[in-house]
Image (spheres, rainbow, N blue to C red):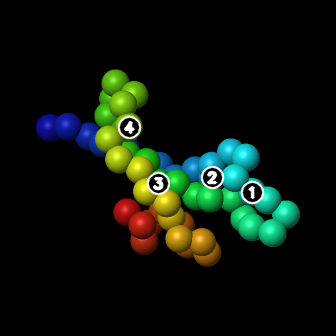
Amino acid sequence: MRAIPVDGKPLRGSRTATTTAIQLLAAMDHHGVALAHRQIASKSNEIPAL
């Protein structure tokens, strides 16, 4: 069986004076290779995006 870890993080440097930071949800394998990533809607979190 294979496990795929998923985590959400704000994109560093993406916040401006008028906008909040862009949130990304990423899935990776255990070798450190990103399998997929997508932007999370503002005012949301990882759970609904997953």
Q: Earlier in the sequence, mark 2 or mark 1?
A: 2
* Label 4 Cα crowd, 10 Å radius (few <14 / some 14-19 / many 20+): few
Residue corresponding to mark 1: 15
Quadrant containing the C terminus in the rendered view: bottom left
Residue corresponding to mark 4: 34
Q: Which mark is residue 6?
A: none
Distance (Cα) linking label 4 and label 2? 16 Å
Q: SS for tag 3?
A: strand
Q: Position of residue 45 (x, y in %)?
A: 53, 66
The quadrant where residue 35 appears: top left
Q: Position of residue 47 (x, y in %)?
A: 44, 66
Q: Residue furthest right?
A: 17
Q: Earlier in the sequence, mark 4 or mark 2?
A: 2
Q: SS for tag 2?
A: strand
Q: Position of residue 5 (x, y in %)?
A: 37, 43
Type of amino acid under label 4: Ala
Q: Earlier in the sequence, mark 3 or mark 4?
A: 3
* Label 1 Cα crowd, 10 Å radius (few <14 / some 14-19 / many 20+): few
Q: Which mark is residue 10?
A: 2
Q: Earlier in the sequence, mark 1 or mark 3?
A: 1
Type of amino acid under label 1: Arg
Distance (Cα) linking label 1 and label 4? 23 Å
Residue 21 falls left or right of residue 40: right
Tag 1 and tag 4, C-beta contact below 8 Å: no
Distance (Cα) linking label 2 and label 1? 9 Å
Q: Earlier in the sequence, mark 1 or mark 4?
A: 1
Type of amino acid under label 3: Leu
Q: Earlier in the sequence, mark 2 or mark 3?
A: 2
Distance (Cα) linking label 2 and label 3? 9 Å
